[in-house]
């Protein structure tokens, strides 16, 4: 039931985002004619197509990925094969990311072209059940096709920003003499486009957070060990908190959404999640997760900051994992 509700929320968010962009294009059509929205629709299609075709190559280069054979990483391949079979999807290509931040991620344009990668640091840090839970999370992203969804949706704020810039400068340069009356609608559209750009960004971020909750639920369903994923997230956050901020910025680049746990907020998240580690052994077991889920609560400030993040608040995320016990 919880998984179905997450799916519904994601679907409603997608519908809302397309409704927002449709409303903006309708406003433009009303003021400047029907031809202009078609131009922006074509631009959106081209940008999405380019992202789909060259996106995987950009990820491979940025995250320094090397694909490995079963002979090189037999246990990793075995876990991916078993989880893919349980999830009912083709086995994705398996790779190692040579960055220092502990991480796992999935990418690709479809279930058949999907790839799943882990960093060497992550494999060194996690127990087998924890690594399996993280891989279950990533394969759930593939199963839910949310990689393609977030790629398509991320274009909408870009289009809104492009509309804002083009109409803003048209209004500025068309604002003298006889053209002043024509410039006012241009500036009005620019203002509306900027507001829609801000709103659409918030919706995309919301969808990004929902997809993380949805993948967490998928991992719990595949492995039956939500505490193992909670423990893995705790270890990953601990590992990220030990990496220098300059290194995080350099290695992460613009790929923040590709991290299973947000490295930027790792130090604050570690402080919050340490309350779950009752015996201070660096992991979270089922009993500790259950108690944490019952008692923990994200602060109002954390919930507010979450609105501008690609990832759910760590406390809320681990707390929700406790509901799957």
Image (cartoon, grey):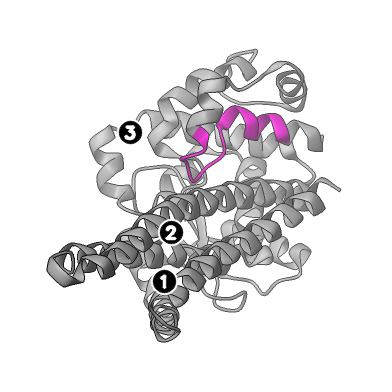
Is 310 displayed left or right of 127 in the figure? left
Q: Which residues are magenta?
A: 306-320
Residue 149 visible in image? yes
Q: Categorize mark 2 by other alpha carbons within 10 Å: few (<14), some (14-19), many (20+).
A: many
Q: Secondary structure at mark 3?
A: loop
> How far across and down, in percent of the image, does residue 78 sit?
65, 61
Q: Categorize mark 3 by other alpha carbons within 10 Å: few (<14), some (14-19), many (20+).
A: some
> How far across and down, in percent of the image, does residue 105 sit?
50, 55
Q: Which mark is residue 96?
A: 2
Q: Nearer the viewer, mark 3 or mark 1?
A: 1
Spatial CA distance of label 3 from label 1 is 26 Å
* CB contact under 8 Å: marks 3 and 1: no
Q: Which residue is mark 1?
A: 56
Q: Which mark is residue 243?
A: 3
Q: Secondary structure at mark 1?
A: helix
Q: Nearer the viewer, residue 284 or 262?
A: 262
């Amino acid at each position: 039931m919880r998984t179905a509700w997450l799916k519904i929320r994601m679907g409603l968010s997608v519908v809302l985002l397309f409704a927002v962009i449709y409303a903006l294009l309708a406003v433009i059509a009303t003021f400047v004619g029907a031809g202009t929205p078609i131009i922006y629709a074509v631009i959106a299609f081209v940008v999405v197509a380019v992202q789909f075709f060259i996106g995987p190559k950009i990820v491979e280069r940025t995250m320094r990925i090397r694909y490995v054979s079963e002979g090189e990483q037999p246990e990793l391949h075995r876990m991916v094969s078993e989880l893919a079979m349980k999830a009912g999807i083709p086995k994705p290509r398996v790779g190692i990311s040579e960055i220092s931040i502990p991480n796992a991620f999935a990418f690709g344009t479809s279930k058949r072209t999907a790839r799943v990668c882990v960093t060497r640091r992550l494999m060194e840090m996690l127990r087998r059940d924890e690594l399996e839970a993280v891989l279950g999370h990533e394969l759930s992203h593939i199963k839910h096709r949310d990689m393609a969804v977030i790629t398509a949706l991320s274009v909408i704020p870009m289009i809104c920003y492009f509309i804002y810039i083009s109409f803003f400068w048209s209004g500025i340069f068309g604002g003298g003499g006889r053209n002043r009356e024509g410039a006012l609608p241009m500036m009005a559209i620019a203002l509306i486009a900027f507001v829609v750009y801000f709103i659409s960004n918030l919706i995309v971020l919301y969808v990004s957070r929902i997809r993380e909750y949805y993948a967490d639920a998928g991992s719990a369903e595949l492995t039956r060990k939500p505490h193992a994923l909670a423990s893995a997230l705790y270890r990953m956050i601990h590992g990220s908190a030990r990496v220098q901020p300059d290194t995080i910025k350099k290695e992460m680049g613009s790929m923040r959404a590709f991290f299973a746990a947000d490295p930027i907020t790792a130090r604050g998240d570690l402080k919050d999640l340490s309350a779950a580690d009752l015996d201070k052994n660096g992991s979270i077991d089922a009993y500790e997760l259950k108690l944490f889920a019952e008692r923990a609560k994200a602060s109002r400030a954390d919930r507010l900051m979450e609105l501008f993040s690609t990832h759910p608040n760590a406390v809320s995320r681990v707390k929700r994992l406790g509901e799957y016990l």
